[in-house]
Amino acid sequence: MRRFSFDIICKFSFGMDLECFIPSLPKSKLADSFNLASKLSKLKEAIGVVDNVAMKIIRQRRTGDDEDDEDNDKS
Protein backbone atom coordinates (compact mmCIF):
# COMPACT_ATOMS: atom_id res chain seq x y z
CA MET A 1 0.00 0.00 0.00
CA ARG A 2 2.88 2.38 0.76
CA ARG A 3 4.36 1.80 -2.68
CA PHE A 4 1.04 2.65 -4.28
CA SER A 5 0.73 5.82 -2.16
CA PHE A 6 4.29 6.76 -2.98
CA ASP A 7 3.76 6.24 -6.72
CA ILE A 8 0.59 8.36 -6.68
CA ILE A 9 2.26 11.17 -4.69
CA CYS A 10 5.26 11.25 -7.02
CA LYS A 11 3.15 11.06 -10.16
CA PHE A 12 0.71 13.84 -9.30
CA SER A 13 2.79 16.07 -7.03
CA PHE A 14 6.15 15.93 -8.78
CA GLY A 15 5.26 14.70 -12.27
CA MET A 16 7.57 11.70 -11.76
CA ASP A 17 6.65 8.09 -12.48
CA LEU A 18 9.07 5.98 -10.46
CA GLU A 19 7.28 2.74 -11.43
CA CYS A 20 7.83 1.16 -8.02
CA PHE A 21 5.54 -1.72 -8.97
CA ILE A 22 7.83 -3.06 -11.70
CA PRO A 23 9.88 -5.81 -9.98
CA SER A 24 12.64 -5.78 -12.62
CA LEU A 25 13.59 -2.19 -11.77
CA PRO A 26 15.97 -1.55 -8.86
CA LYS A 27 14.49 -0.19 -5.64
CA SER A 28 14.47 3.56 -5.40
CA LYS A 29 16.29 5.22 -2.50
CA LEU A 30 13.49 7.76 -2.48
CA ALA A 31 10.87 5.00 -2.18
CA ASP A 32 12.83 3.35 0.63
CA SER A 33 13.11 6.69 2.42
CA PHE A 34 9.38 7.27 2.01
CA ASN A 35 8.66 3.86 3.58
CA LEU A 36 11.01 4.55 6.48
CA ALA A 37 9.49 7.99 7.09
CA SER A 38 6.03 6.43 7.12
CA LYS A 39 7.10 3.82 9.67
CA LEU A 40 8.83 6.42 11.84
CA SER A 41 5.71 8.57 11.78
CA LYS A 42 3.67 5.64 13.09
CA LEU A 43 6.34 4.93 15.71
CA LYS A 44 6.26 8.54 16.87
CA GLU A 45 2.47 8.34 17.25
CA ALA A 46 2.74 5.08 19.22
CA ILE A 47 5.38 6.57 21.52
CA GLY A 48 3.04 9.49 22.18
CA VAL A 49 0.27 7.11 23.27
CA VAL A 50 2.62 5.22 25.61
CA ASP A 51 3.94 8.51 27.01
CA ASN A 52 0.42 9.82 27.69
CA VAL A 53 -0.57 6.66 29.56
CA ALA A 54 2.66 6.64 31.58
CA MET A 55 2.24 10.31 32.54
CA LYS A 56 -1.37 9.67 33.59
CA ILE A 57 -0.24 6.84 35.87
CA ILE A 58 2.54 8.99 37.34
CA ARG A 59 0.10 11.86 38.04
CA GLN A 60 -2.39 9.47 39.67
CA ARG A 61 0.27 8.00 41.92
CA ARG A 62 1.59 11.42 42.94
CA THR A 63 -1.89 12.65 43.91
CA GLY A 64 -2.93 9.36 45.53
CA ASP A 65 -5.87 8.92 43.16
CA ASP A 66 -4.92 5.37 42.25
CA GLU A 67 -7.69 3.24 43.80
CA ASP A 68 -5.98 -0.02 42.86
CA ASP A 69 -2.98 0.84 45.04
CA GLU A 70 -5.27 1.66 47.98
CA ASP A 71 -7.04 -1.70 47.62
CA ASN A 72 -3.71 -3.52 47.51
CA ASP A 73 -2.48 -1.73 50.66
CA LYS A 74 -5.51 -2.95 52.66
CA SER A 75 -4.91 -6.64 51.98
Image (cartoon, grey):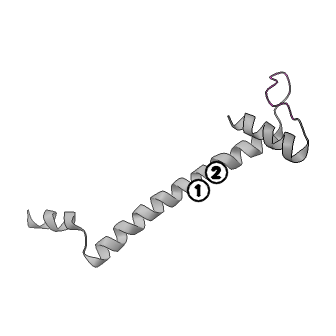
Q: Amino acid at mark 2?
A: Leu
Residue 5 at what x, y percent from top left? 73, 39
For the C terminus, give its image quadrant: bottom left
Residue sitting nearer the eye, 8 or 51? 8
Residue 73 at what x, y percent from top left? 13, 67
Label 1 and label 2: CA atoms lie apart by: 6 Å
Which quadrant of the view contains residue 58? bottom left
Q: Which mark is residue 25?
A: none
Which quadrant of the view contains residue 25? top right
Which residue is drawn at the image coordinates 35% and 66% (left, top)? 57
For the N terminus, give its image quadrant: top right
Neighbor class of circle 2 (other Cα within 10 Å; few <14, some 14-19, many 20+) is few
Q: Is residue 71 above or below residue 32?
A: below
Looking at the image, the residue that sits furthest to the right is 15
Q: Is residue 73 above or below residue 50?
A: below
Question: Element type at marker 1?
Answer: helix
Q: Which mark is residue 40?
A: 2
Which residue is drawn at the image coordinates 89% and 46% (left, top)? 14
Q: Which mark is residue 44?
A: 1
Residue 72 at what x, y percent from top left? 15, 63
Question: Element type at marker 2?
Answer: helix
Q: Amino acid at mark 1?
A: Lys
Which quadrant of the view contains residue 55? bottom left
Looking at the image, the residue that sits furthest to the front is 12
Q: Is residue 67 magenta?
A: no
Q: Is 67 placed left or right of 58 in the picture? A: left
Per the rendered image, the range of residues in magenta is 18-25
